[in-house]
Image (cartoon, rainbow, N blue to C red):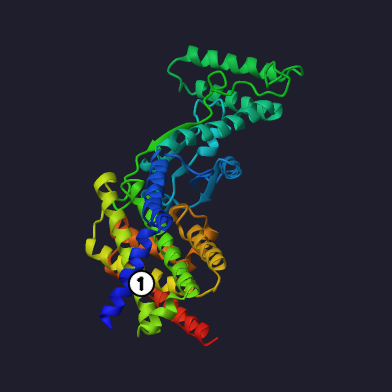
């Protein structure tokens, strides 16, 4: 029995080797995908809508309005959280950056001529340095827009000037200015500005009346916002490089190619009479199916180990827990071998089987992190990914790599994969036997 099983397994491996197209998509295509996505993500590029966690300690009207303006910005995906959550999420790499609006933010923002400038604190994931300048630009742009709106509102500016002049004169009366001449010049400047705003012909937007905004860079000396950068010490178990994220994806694509090749081969052999000839040679149907599944399992293990070695030797990916990785590869192999058995009997037509198989595989990949890394999936897709074996396979691969799962954390992932494999194999055998009976 064992000799027949190994003979059938060897036959399937030889057929795969002779199929140049199948060989390319099983072995070469996943390498290309892993290197391509790894190089693309290494460039620091991000998806549209930077994830920004906002902490508003001030809770004043100006601070709430500023946060709402950021939340409506196309460039950002704003989530309001507390400071501890914000720091933890960015530290773990689950969010790109956080912004803290401190106490008295609204006071400084409202008192334009008080000498204080509204200050915020910005913390950015060091692995996403490229977005720091972009975030600073976005924040300054919206702060400048607020300032421009203030300059354009004559009644509001008049109130600001009245309040600032009153504060300056009270401070001079108390002798709080070290340089009284400087205070006198500031008083005179604000008085003249007050007179300008009282003039009906005054155009706060500048001389350009064609709807184009004036230069908002500093507003002739008024800085719209001060951004203080906060250093973030990221969690050490994050991915050391983009290739630690992309190579598990590449392995998945190789496995999907392997699953497709083997599932279609069973359809072809059944239609060409190969299965019937094997049955005449005293091999039973269970042995044939087991041999097919074993060949698929061996190929999956070979693909995975080859890509991991390539990634380690050339791209420096890390495998911190080799024994756990071995357990993960076995569970992944069993899972997709079982799925292969199910997909191989969904149709008796080669074209129909190919269409159904790749449609299902692409859906699994799109929702499970095979195309977009799990960390970047939107919330609704993260929920759907719970039903994708691709998601659990990627977790099983990343666990012994940069996630450094404990055995307690890894076991539920392996259990899900084994359950998927067992269900696929059981349903595949039942359908295969039912087709025979029909």
Looking at the rendered image, the quarter that the C terminus falls into is bottom right
Visible residue check, residue 435? yes
Q: SS class of the residue under badge 1? A: helix
Residue bearing mark 1: 334
User: Looking at this rendering, what residue extends furthest in the bottom direction?
Assistant: 437
Residue situated in front as seen by the camera: 268 or 99: 268
Q: Residue at x 44, y 45 (%)?
A: 96
Indicate the position of residue 281 as horizontal and vertical percent values: 35, 83
Q: Residue at x 31, y 45 (%)?
A: 233
Visible residue check, residue 56? no
Indicate the position of residue 287 as horizontal and vertical percent values: 35, 81
Looking at the rendered image, the quarter that the N terminus falls into is bottom left
Crowd tier of the residue under label 1, counting other residues whose Cα lies within 10 Å: few below 14, some 14–19, many 20 or above: many
User: Please, is residue 376 above or below residue 141 in the view?
Assistant: below
Residue situated in front as seen by the camera: 181 or 72: 72
Residue 405 figure quarter: bottom left
């Amino acid at each position: 029995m064992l000799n027949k099983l190994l003979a059938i397994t060897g036959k399937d491996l030889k057929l795969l080797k002779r199929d140049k197209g199948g060989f390319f998509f099983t072995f070469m295509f996943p390498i290309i995908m892993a290197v391509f996505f790894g190089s693309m993500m290494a460039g620091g590029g991000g998806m549209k809508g930077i994830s920004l966690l906002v902490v508003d300690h001030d809770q004043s009207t100006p601070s709430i309005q500023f946060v709402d303006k950021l939340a409506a910005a196309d460039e950002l995906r704003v989530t309001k959280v507390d400071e501890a959550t914000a720091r933890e999420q960015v530290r773990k790499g689950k969010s790109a950056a956080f912004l803290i609006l401190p106490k008295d933010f609204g006071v400084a923002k409202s008192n334009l001529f008080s000498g204080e400038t509204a200050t915020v604190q910005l913390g950015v994931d060091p692995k996403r340095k490229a977005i720091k300048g972009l975030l600073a630009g976005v924040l300054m742009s919206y702060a400048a827009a607020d300032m421009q709106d203030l300059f354009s509102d004559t009644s509001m500016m008049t109130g600001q000037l009245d309040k600032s002049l009153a504060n300056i004169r009270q401070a001079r009366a108390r002798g709080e200015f070290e340089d009284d001449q400087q205070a006198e010049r500031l008083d005179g400047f604000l008085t003249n500005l007050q007179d300008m705003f009282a003039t009906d012909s005054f155009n706060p937007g500048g001389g350009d009346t064609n709807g184009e905004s004036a230069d908002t860079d500093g507003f002739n000396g008024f800085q719209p916002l001060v951004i203080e950068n906060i250093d973030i010490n990221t969690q050490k178990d994050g991915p050391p490089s983009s290739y630690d994220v992309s190579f598990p994806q590449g392995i998945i694509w190789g496995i999907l190619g392997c699953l497709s090749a083997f599932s279609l081969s069973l359809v072809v052999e059944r239609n060409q009479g190969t299965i019937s000839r094997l049955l005449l040679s005293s091999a039973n149907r269970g042995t044939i199916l087991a041999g097919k599944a074993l060949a698929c399992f061996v190929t999956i293990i070979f693909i995975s180990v080859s890509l991991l070695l390539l990634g380690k030797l050339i791209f420096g990916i890390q495998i911190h827990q080799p024994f756990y990785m071995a357990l993960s590869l076995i569970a992944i192999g069993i899972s997709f071998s079982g799925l292969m058995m199910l997909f191989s009997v969904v149709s008796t037509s080669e074209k129909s089987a190919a269409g159904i198989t790749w449609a299902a595989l692409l859906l699994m990949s799109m929702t499970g992190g095979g195309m977009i890394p799990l960390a970047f999936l939107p919330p609704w897709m993260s929920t759907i990914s719970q039903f994708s074996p691709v998601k659990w396979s990627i977790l099983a691969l990343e666990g012994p790599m940069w996630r450094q799962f404990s055995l307690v954390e890894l076991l539920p992932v392996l259990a899900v994969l084994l359950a998927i494999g067992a269900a696929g194999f059981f349903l595949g055998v039942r359908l295969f036997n039912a087709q025979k009976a029909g």
